[in-house]
Image (cartoon, coloured by chain):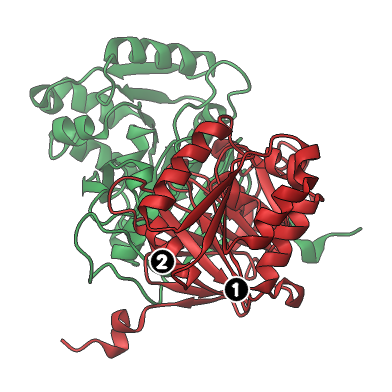
Chain colours: A red, B green
Amino acid sequence: MQSRSFFRGRLIAIGGNEDKTGERLVLKRVVHEVGKADYKVCVITTASDYPEKRGKDYHRIFRQLGAPEVEVLNITARMQANDRTSVQMIEDADLIFLTGGDQLRLTTIIGGSGLFEAIQNRLEAGALIAGTSAGAAVFSDTMIYEGQSEDGLFKGSVLTTSGFGFVKKIIFDTHFMARGRIGRLVQIVTTNPTCIGVGIGEDSGVILKGDGEAEVIGTGQVIIVDGSDIDHSNIMDIQPGSPIAAENVRIHSLVNGYGYNFKNRRFVAPSNNNPEQRDD
Amino acid sequence: MQSRSFFRGRLIAIGGNEDKTGERLVLKRVVHEVGKADYKVCVITTASDYPEKRGKDYHRIFRQLGAPEVEVLNITARMQANDRTSVQMIEDADLIFLTGGDQLRLTTIIGGSGLFEAIQNRLEAGALIAGTSAGAAVFSDTMIYEGQSEDGLFKGSVLTTSGFGFVKKIIFDTHFMARGRIGRLVQIVTTNPTCIGVGIGEDSGVILKGDGEAEVIGTGQVIIVDGSDIDHSNIMDIQPGSPIAAENVRIHSLVNGYGYNFKNRRFVAPSNNNPEQRDD
């Protein structure tokens, strides 16, 4: 993670399909992470095909989870993304939540707008920004927006563009195990091993601090794909559409309570689960 | 690979859905690997739900590819698997081909039979045994027969049983990229890092010699999952159904012309593709 990624707030990237009616482990942790009793939530539904409905759903959910104040921003056109009232809502928010849908809608409509700038400023100033599915994919500077897993290891089959760039060189992919997306991240770390791939399972998430430390939450897995040990790949020698060969891609599977340090690429086991410290 | 796995023949494990009408790269290589002009093929359709049809299909295909003699064994019950005429067909065969379908049908009907013993003897004596999909999964001593990828990293979600055991501690999985099955192999190598996972893509295959050297063929990938570097996992501490954490799973992606040595766990790049030797 580059030093310019530093921010005082926190990012929570959720893998999609988080539990909204049962234990709600992930969403409970999201509101807990705000860190105070009196806070404002702003939900941005731009990624969604049904922004009004999605907005109502999350309004209800966050209220049920105890949020004192929840606003919904149904921004569906660039013009609205510079609207002063909307920007003010972001400036007042302690938790900004980006719903799922299509990440290209987020970047296309909000990218480079006053609203975008306000979100980034809030993150730098200490607010919490959480996103699920498309709302998490957009966190990266390099954002995956298309690519079937079955094509994931064929050169050029994973399409990326510039995301919101809250973090640099960390690529978030979502619905990870359910949609078998490992090939997408392997392709990206093979083409540039500086990048670290983060494949987030459904009902799971990663809490990321500005110093590069991350904690995994939820009921599933987060898969880290680290290409820094790759010794050989054929990526420079093959044509688009050809299958990719790569030697030594390092994978970690993390579950609730485990951590990862993106700065030094270290897997962090919870101390009570550390074999050296087990007493049995 | 244990030393007792040594055999003079060759195994070709195919990931399923190999091209049967176009370039037929994989099947052409299968007949080429027999290594002589005058040879007999024996097709075993036991895994298939439609053995008669499958048998006719492969009979036609192998004849089209120039095989001088093709016999089909539609064994559908254990009693037939000890039939002297069938055993004789195997004893005479230079290439034994196992079709896809359900690998449990293969082990349940043929396991421990006279036919099984004959196949194993032929492999040891120098014959070629090829299998696609279920017909390849059965090669392992530990055979995966059930387990969705989305469940693959939850303890106990991948069901295995004893396969034909032509090779030891090498676990073949098939339709690998198309069905996103990486989690199944990660679970297996985490529970026993002695095992090496081999995830074979569709229209792709692995040619494996008795000394542990392997070559990849076809239009897709073969993914090697090596758990020998795993430093930490939670597998001993969690209940069945809980998500698996694992640190440092090593993955290689191999394509046509690449190799892997199972004895010393080495990725082998083709020499004309070796960066050190490139002249540009």
- Residue B120 x/y as whole percent: 26, 42
* Residue B90 tag number: none
- Residue A251 x/y as whole percent: 50, 63
Q: Chain of mark 1?
A: A
- Hey, what amino acid is under mark 1? Phe
- Residue A267 x/y as whole percent: 48, 75
Residue B41 in sight in this render: yes
Would you say A228 lies left or right of A25 here? Answer: right
What residue does disc 1 label? Answer: A262
- Residue A184 x/y as whole percent: 60, 47
On-image quarter of the C terminus of chain A: bottom left
The one nearer the camera, B115 or A114, is: A114
The one nearer the camera, A207 or A31, is: A31
Residue A17 in sight in this render: no
Q: Are marks 1 and 2 on the same chain?
A: no
On-image quarter of the N terminus of chain A: bottom right
- Hey, what amino acid is under mark 2? Gly
What residue does disc 2 label? Answer: B227
